[in-house]
Amino acid sequence: MPFLSKTTTAFGGLLLAHACYSAREHTTLQSLRAATAATLTSSPAAAVSLPVDIVIETIISTLIILLGLVLATRPLRPLEWRVWAGKIEREGEEGFTDGSGAADKGFVGNPFSVLESRPNFVDIRKQRREFAEWVQKGTAQQ
Amino acid sequence: MAPSVLHPPSHLSPAEALAVSQQAPGILRASAAAVSSSPLASLLAGPEDPELWLQYENLIVSCLRTGDDLAANACLRRLAIRFTAGNERVQALRGLVREAEAKNNGELERVLKEYDEILEANDTNIPVAKRRIALLRSMGRLPDAASALVRLLDFSPTDAEAWSELSDIYLSQGLYPQAIYAVEEVLVLAPNAWNIHARLGELQYMAATAPGVSTGSYQKYMAEAIKRFSRSIELCDDYLRGYYGLKLVSKKLLSNGAKAMKQADDSEFALPDTSTVERLNELATAKLAAIVRHSTARDRGWRGYSEADVSAARVLLTEDASAIKR
């Protein structure tokens, strides 16, 4: 659900921006007030911390952004060996695609299948013969 | 969708190999003919893509298979420019091209002699040693190939691929105990490989059903086969090949009944009792039926099985059903 996660992240970002703006406004206002107070009474201004609502808004907006990002992650890979292996066998390449439908680049199927296909020992002459026979069969059928 | 050029193509079907080799002209055109390895050039040009060399290697095999020798030679030339002609893998690939282009036995002998010369200069050249073994096997000299492979494994005993090839050579000679031993070595090196466990189970089953096997070793092989297929299922959920083998073995054990099962139970290779075998058989039947049903319906998440495997499972199940009706 890319739409939900994106709107959540955008909403969180909006809140965060609002919190930042509020914090900035607050500090400007405070320093201005402190400056006027200093000229009037010449007493040192007490250090003022941010109001609680701005702090809470910042924290909540961060959490909302996190939620949006977490929602956007791809489904996690199986942790158990047999589940992962079963996924390879059962779903093939299809189980390892990302959102756009293209297969994961690192997907190799069963990583142990090379032990049975043995590419370094390939009998190229036999493969060539078999391919030629396959072509002949194809043309004969047409 | 055409299979990726990044994976070794030796297991592909003819149609898929054709699809791969038809990508060759495009890939050759898209990349520069010569990539210089000098530091100045690598500063000016972008970083070189290691996948390109992998693609060339795989394209050579696919193109040779489909008879496109021109493209194969072009790929080989580029690899030779980049890695020099003395590189071990380039030497092996050049040999591969020569083998494919050889028209008669004399030319093959000449290629073999070239391999011997290379190995004489450097007898740890593993790619060329493997090519030499493959060529010997292709020329039908199985004992020579087996002894050369044993010598290779003597100094490189952790090569799982070579053990697997040795097992295959022994199997083609009908030497089941040796073939089983070699696959067990593969399993020592790759203990989680579920397909190799299934392969070992298949070998044990073949050994058990070979003509002229004594009752004792028959039981031993069958017990081992059940264990191996069970392990492959343990390592991989819904593994068609594992369940197929389990079903085959348990059916065979149940069909020849109690007479073969009366052996003393103290040996390590005692068969499980009949009720266990029956339950295994039921489990395998249920799982196979589910797999066949889902893949025939092309359900989402069940499309990874190959067509041939599923139809073989279907045949096994229908045989079983008709046997029960009778």
Image (tube, coloured by chain):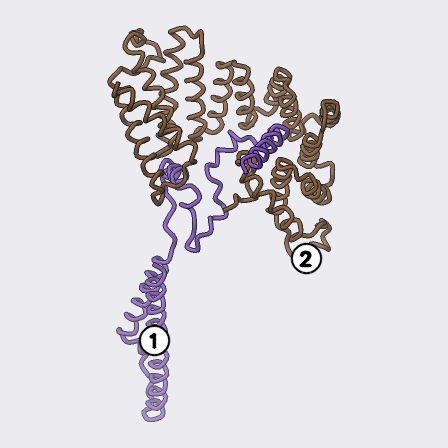
Chain colours: A purple, B brown
Q: State the quadrant of the C terminus of chain A.
A: top right
3D distance between C-alphas at marks 1 and 2 = 46 Å
Position of A53 with respect to B66 (left or right) is left
Residue at coordinates 33% horizontally, 68% vertically from top-left? A12
Position of B23 with respect to B90 (left or right) is left
Residue A69 position (above or below residue A142): below
| Kind of residue sitting beneath label 2 | Ala
Find numbered disc 2 in the image and state the secondary structure of the residue it sits on: loop
| Kind of residue sitting beneath label 1 | His
Find numbered disc 1 in the image and state the secondary structure of the residue it sits on: helix
Evaluate if marks 1 and 2 touch, with contact meaning CB atoms under 8 Å apart. Answer: no
Tell me where residue A103 appears, x and y as whole percent: 46, 48
Q: State the quadrant of the N terminus of chain A.
A: bottom left
- What label does residue A18 carry, if any? 1
Chain hosting mark 2: B
Residue at coordinates 28% horizontally, 70% vertically from top-left? A56
Residue at coordinates 55% horizontally, 15% vertically from top-left? B173
Give the residue number, with chain letter if any, for mark 2: B45
